Structures are given as C-alpha cells and as structure tokens.
C-alpha cells in the first residue's frame, strides 16, 4: 500500500523528467509519459480497492510523527476521487498524442511532461493529510498549469494567462497567510490535529479561519463572485489542456473545501455557503446562455456546476456531503469529455464559434451522439450519471427543508439544458457554414482522438452504470468525514 | 571556470568580467560548503542552488557564454529527488526516510552525512536549471521555462 | 510577539495589496514580492516567542519553533519560482504590445456591447 501511494505521486513526476530529457525522440517521449500516467492510474484503482476493504491507510513520510512531519492519508474520500482524476488525465494524454501533430495542439515537447507534473500535484493534493502539503500540491498544479496555459506564447494566451496567474497567485498568497493564522491559533497544520483543535477555539476565531479558507479554496474553485478569471482563461488554451483544467482544477478547490470544512465542522458557515452556491449556479447558467462560443459556454457551465457541489457541502449533513462527493465524481469525467468534443468540433470547423459552425449532425453523426450523451448527463437527465448526482444533492436539500436553494438548483438545471440546446442548434443543426475550414489532421491521429473521446464517454456511462455502488461508497466517505474523531484517530498513533 | 576573455559587446567595460572571474571560484566554494553543511547546519540544497544561480547570472551579465542546459539540469534534479524519495521503500522503510552515515577521514576528521545529501544535490540542480531557464527565457522572450519546486 | 514584526506585516500587506491592484504587471510582481514577505513574517510570528536557533545539539533550553521556519523556507522557494515565471510573462507581453498591462476579458466586452451594436 505504501508503494502504491508513492507510485501515484512519484511515477508521473519521474516520467515527466525522463520525457523532458529525451524530448526530441517522439516515440520514447510519448511512451514514457504515458507509462508514468498509466502506472499512477492503475495504482489508484488498487488503492481504492484496498481502502474500500480495509479502511483508511496512512503513510508517515520520513517516519516523523504527525506533529512535525508530513502525512499522506488515503481515506475513502481521497481513494474515491483519485482514480477518476488520474483516469481522466490518462485519456486526455491519449487524445493529446493524437492532437499534437496538428496545428491546434500544444507544444508536444512540453505538454506531456508538464501534464506529468500536474498529475503528481493532483495525487498529492488528494492524498495529503496536512494543509501545508496541500499548499505545495496546489503550487505544483498551478505552476504546471501556468506554463501549460501560456507556453504557446500566442497573444490571446499571454493576455488571459496574466489574469489567470495573477488571480491564482493572489489566492496562493492568501493561503499562505491563512496557514500562518491557523498555525498561530492551533500550533499545527496537520488536518487530523486541526479537526480536534479548531472546534475548541473561540467561535469568532473559528469563523474567521473557516471564512478565510473559504475565500482561498473558493477562488481556486471559481465560486461566485470569484469566478471571472475562469471563462476568460480556459478557452484560450489548446483543447487537451482546457479539458484537464476543466475536469480537475476547480474540482480540487472544491475537494479541499469539502475536506477542510467538514473535518473542522464549519457548520456555522453553511447558510452563507448556500447563498453563494445559489448565486454560483444561476450566474454560471445565465452566463453560459449569453456566450456564442462552444468552449466559453462549457466554461460557464463549470461555474454553474460548482454551485451544486457547494450546495451539497453547505447543507452540512451526511446526505449533503454524499451528494457533493457523488457530484464531484460524476462531474470530472463529464466536463472533460465535453471539452474533448469541443476540441473535435474545433478540429472539424476550424473554430469553436457558433456562428461559424453548423450542419455537423449530417456531416458527422457520430460526433452528435458523442456530444449528446455527456450533454444530457450534465443537464441531469436520467438515466445518466448527472441525474443520480443531482438527485442526491437536491434530495439532501429537500431533507434539510432548504426550499429556496432547491428551487434555484432546479432552475439552474433548466438553464443548463437551454444553453446545451444552443450548442446543439448552432453546431449540429442547420446548414454547414461556408467559413468552416477543417484543421488538416492525419487519419491515424484523428482516429486516436476519436478513440480517446469514445473511451471517455464510455467511462461516464460506466459511472452511471455503477451509480449504486458509487453512492454507497460516497455515503461511507461522507460518514467518515462527518463523524468527529474518525479521521483523527486513524492519523495519530 | 577561469575564462577571463572580455566579451565582444562589452569591451569598454572590463572590470565586471575580471571581478566575476575572480569571484566565481570563491562563490562556488561557498555554494559547495552550503550544500554539504545543509544536513545539520544552516545551508542546504536551495541555498546552494541560489548561490550557484547567482554565479550563472553574474557570468551572463559579464557576457561569459553559458554551456549548461537548463532542461537537462531540471530533469536530472527531479530524477535524483524522486529516486531518493522512493529508495527507502525498497528497504521496507517509510517514504523519504533518512539514512545517516558517518565516516572518519584522515584530514577532515569525522564526516556525517546521509541520504539528505543526494536530495540536496537534486534540489540544487533544479534551482540552477530554473535560473538558467529564466535567463534564456528573458533573452529570447520565450515563455517556456519552469516546472519548478 | 513583537509589535515591530506585526507592524511590518501590516505595512507589507498594505503595500502589497495596493500594488497588485495596478494594471501593470511589473507593479503586480513587486506587490506579490511584498505580500510574500508579509506571509513569511506572519509564519515566523505564528511560531511563538524567540529562542536559540533550532539546531541539533546546541544544548539551549528554549529553542525557536522550527516548523514555521521550514514552512517559510518552502514558501520562499515557491515564490522564487513564481516570480521568475511572472517576469518572463511580463517580458513576453512586452514583446507583443510594448507594455505590460493586464487587459480585460475581450470576449466578455464584445458580448456586453453586442446589444448596443445591434440597436445601432
């Protein structure tokens, strides 16, 4: 188990260093990067199986005790999210290998290795048991994302990259100041110890710490009103990179929030979270309606969906947290797939603008099918995974008799459906646009891209197929998080 | 290391290249000291890396051509760090566990070091690589550096 | 807890926040530099009172808490790397447009003014 946990963090890092070392050799580079990501993804599934059977596994790094050292904690919540995230990155890497040789692709010498660094950071963020290592993991993810976003050096990317970097750097600085505050108040940054010590603090200090970290994680997660950087920066990056960002980055913010705020029991913040969740849903959904570009519509959907996860968390009940975890697991692959399809649309039309698209339903009917499945899932229609996740969150809201937020969630769902219809009408119906200029792509590469996308669609269908099992696992994870002392008892020795 | 030839574009200003040539070995010595001292005393990989980085920066200001490749340095550093982190797993110890070795040498006396030393060397390589990447990045206006700490 | 350190943290934070509200990226970089220093000082203050250097075997009774120092060092390493990146970004921006201003979201502005343009 120790080795498995080490593999998820170290294998992608080692692979990216090796890949960068022989970056001129295309085949060796792609194989190394892929092998590293594959090893990590495979290990994560074994971790899930192990944790589901034997319970939480803790690694005391360097054999220090948790007061001073770093701990990695594979509890059920981390073990559940990790395989989903790592599989997504693996699928995107397959797509990227296909896309790389086209003019739209990211710089192949850098994109693969940086994806490895990002993966390593993602694993670390999910597995870490202390706030400071979480900060380091965030930085690892962000630094590679900064370079991935701007490395092509085109004007639009530099422009939006500046907003993205400044915004995220700002929240990182707040994170660091927050760490100082937490350390001054409790004398530890270990989450298990924080779970014991924070509830003993005076109410005002507790609220201050909770609110501070809500802003920090909220900026990463693009919660209203801290979301404006997201739709600005994501669409300018190459498709594969946007797909990874869309699937993972904001979700890591939400993950950290679920972990920190449930462990330290910040139930007092619940009402404020629910209000912001409502605004996030509605503003994201309405923002999506106003857009005229496929990738920008999808970017606004990310914001709207973050609202649902925040709603599940803000209810501060086992049912609510279960819903939030299930939504997280469902949302990561669906969002990634939609962006990959956005990339295929871009490849077929030469642009992702609605005004320059049309008629793809007759020209490429398989693309329409591939789009329809995750789109319906995202809008929350049965029998897809989005329905189960949305149902879990909304029924938790009904249980807590928070009727306003339930109503807002349903309206936001309708608006999401409406903007999906807008993409459908603009891209798939009507006559083919005269301005469309397909990006020249070799047949084999195109096949690889389509295979990757189909794999990912199949993955989202698998999630809806196993919805029952996933719901049980999410509930167990939520109970572990919500029961005081369970997490702390595992980590201390 | 003792290349004192003035540069083509900087002929009128020879004080800088001369003093850089003078200071390079001293600073390199300080860097090496910091690298080895880092185990139990102030110093360590990052501090050593910054000193070496400062040498590289000074030399490039003085116009001395740089022969190191940033990417290889960063890659080698990351690989060393990963190897040191993972090695204890093969002996059944915890991730990143430390081993301390002490040997007695004739002139230097008792020397204590451990698996932290290769780790520090890896960190130094990464930091120097980053500095070089920045210098070449600023020169060509090419935003491609840095999968950093 | 020393009042001088607290005032320094306050001053650095204030100056830093003022600078990062600027349009020019070079000012923002300076602002983040100040904020980084403020955060590191805050970490040191959070470690409690002063003591001897926390080195192995120096026999002091009261040593300074070493954890915040370890945290601060890591934070310095990270802010070092990020400052390098921001500088390169500013340079790149300079190559494109001769300035280093952070611009608005162009697409957003286009959509916002679309309605007016339709009426005209």
Image (spheres, rainbow, N blue to C red):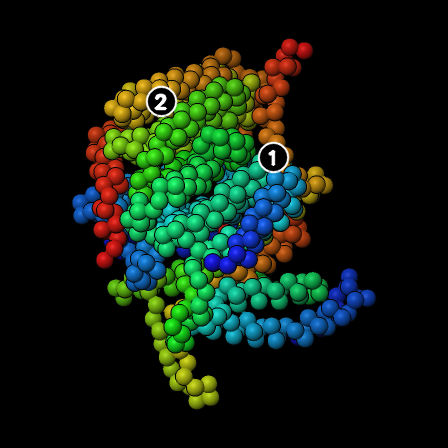
Please name whichever residue, B27 or A279, is drawn nearer the observer in this view of the structure: A279
Question: Residue A377, position in %: x, y?
Answer: 34, 24
Q: Chain of mark 1?
A: A
User: Does label 1 lie on the same chain as label 2?
Assistant: yes
Question: Residue C101, position in %: x, y?
Answer: 66, 39
| Label 2 – label 1 distance at C-alpha | 37 Å
Q: Which residue is mark 1?
A: A156
A485 with respect to A24 (left or right): left
Mark found first going from the N terminus, 2 or 1: 1
Q: Residue at x 57, y 67 (%)?
A: B51
Q: Find residue A408 and report its image quarter.
A: top left
Question: Residue B113, position in %: x, y?
Answer: 40, 75
Q: Chain of mark 2?
A: A
C106 with respect to A34 (left or right): right
Please name whichever residue, A331 or C70, is drawn nearer the observer in this view of the structure: C70
A215 with respect to A292 (left or right): left
In the rendered image of this protein, does residue A317 appear above or below residue B24?
Answer: above
Q: Residue at x 37, y 79 (%)?
A: B102
The mark found on residue A405 in the picture is: 2
Determine the secondary structure under disc 1: helix
């Amino acid at each position: 188990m120790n080795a498995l946990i080490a593999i998820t963090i170290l294998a992608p890092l080692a692979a990216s260093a090796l890949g960068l070392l022989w970056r001129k050799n295309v085949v060796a580079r792609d194989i190394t990067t892929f092998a590293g990501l594959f090893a990590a993804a495979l290990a994560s599934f074994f971790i899930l199986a192990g944790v589901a059977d034997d319970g939480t596994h803790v690694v005391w790094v360097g054999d220090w005790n948790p007061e001073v050292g770093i701990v990695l904690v594979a509890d059920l919540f981390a073990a559940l999210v990790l395989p989903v995230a790592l599989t997504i990155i693996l699928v995107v890497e397959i797509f990227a290998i296909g896309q790389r040789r086209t003019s739209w692709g990211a710089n192949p010498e850098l994109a693969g290795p940086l994806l490895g660094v990002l993966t390593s950071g993602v694993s670390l963020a999910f597995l870490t048991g202390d706030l400071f290592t979480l900060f380091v993991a965030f930085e690892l993810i962000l630094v590679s994302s900064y370079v991935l976003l701007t490395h092509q050096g085109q004007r639009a990317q530099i422009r939006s990259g500046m907003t993205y970097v400044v915004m995220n750097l700002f929240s990182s600085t707040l994170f660091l100041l927050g760490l100082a505050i937490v350390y001054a108040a409790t004398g530890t940054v270990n989450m298990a110890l924080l779970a014991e010590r924070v509830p003993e603090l005076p109410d005002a200090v507790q609220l201050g710490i909770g609110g501070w970290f809500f802003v920090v994680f909220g900026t990463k997660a693009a919660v209203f009103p801290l979301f404006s950087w997201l739709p600005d920066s994501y669409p300018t990056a190459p498709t594969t990179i946007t797909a990874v960002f869309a699937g993972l980055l904001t979700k890591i913010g939400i993950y950290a929030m679920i972990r920190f705020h449930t462990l330290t029991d910040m139930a007092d913040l619940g009402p404020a979270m629910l209000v912001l969740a409502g605004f996030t849903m509605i503003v994201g959904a309405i923002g999506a309606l106003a857009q005229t570009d496929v990738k920008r519509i999808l970017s606004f959907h990310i914001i709207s969906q973050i609202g649902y996860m925040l709603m599940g968390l803000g209810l501060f009940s086992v049912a609510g947290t279960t819903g939030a975890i299930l939504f997280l697991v469902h949302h990561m692959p669906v969002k990634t797939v939609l962006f990959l399809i956005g990339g295929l649309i871009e490849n077929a039309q030469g642009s992702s603008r609605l005004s320059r698209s049309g008629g793809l339903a007759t020209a490429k009917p398989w693309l329409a099918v591939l789009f329809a499945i995750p789109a319906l899932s995202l809008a929350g229609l049965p029998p897809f995974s989005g329905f189960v996740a949305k149902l879990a969150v909304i029924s938790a809201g009904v249980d807590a008799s928070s009727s306003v937020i339930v109503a807002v969630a349903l309206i936001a769902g309708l608006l999401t459906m409406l903007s999906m219809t807008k993409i459908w009408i603009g891209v798939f119906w009507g006559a083919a646009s005269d301005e469309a200029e397909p990006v020249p792509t070799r047949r084999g590469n195109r096949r690889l891209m389509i295979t990757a996308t189909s794999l990912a669609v199949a993955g989202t269908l698998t999630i809806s197929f196993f919805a029952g099992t996933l719901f049980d696992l999410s509930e167990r994870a939520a109970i572990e998080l919500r029961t005081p002392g369970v997490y702390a008892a595992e980590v201390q020795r | 290391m003792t290349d004192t030839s003035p540069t083509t574009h900087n002929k009128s200003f020879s004080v800088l290249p001369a003093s850089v040539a003078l200071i390079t070995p001293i600073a390199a010595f300080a860097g090496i000291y910091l690298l080895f001292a880092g185990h139990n005393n102030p110093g360590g990989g990052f501090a050593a890396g910054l000193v070496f980085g400062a040498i590289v920066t000074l030399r490039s200001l003085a116009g001395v051509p740089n022969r190191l490749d940033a990417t290889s340095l960063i890659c080698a550093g990351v690989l060393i760090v990963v190897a040191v982190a993972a090695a204890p797993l093969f002996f059944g110890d915890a991730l990143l566990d430390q081993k301390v070795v002490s040997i007695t040498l004739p002139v230097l006396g008792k020397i204590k070091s451990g698996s932290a030393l290769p780790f520090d060397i890896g960190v130094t390589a990464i930091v120097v690589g980053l500095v070089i990447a920045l210098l070449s990045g600023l020169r060509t206006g090419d935003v491609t550096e840095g999968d950093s700490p | 807890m020393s009042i001088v350190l607290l005032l320094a943290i306050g001053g650095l934070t204030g100056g830093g926040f003022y600078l990062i509200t600027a349009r020019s990226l070079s000012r923002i970089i300076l602002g983040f530099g100040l904020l980084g220093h403020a955060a590191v000082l805050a970490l040191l203050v959070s470690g409690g009172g002063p003591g001897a250097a926390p080195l192995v075997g120096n026999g002091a009774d009261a040593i300074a808490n070493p954890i915040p120092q370890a945290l601060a060092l890591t934070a310095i390493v990270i802010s070092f790397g990020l400052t390098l990146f921001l500088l390169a970004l500013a340079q790149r921006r300079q190559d494109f447009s001769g300035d280093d201003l952070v611009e608005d979201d162009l697409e957003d502005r286009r959509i916002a003014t679309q309605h007016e343009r339709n009426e005209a």
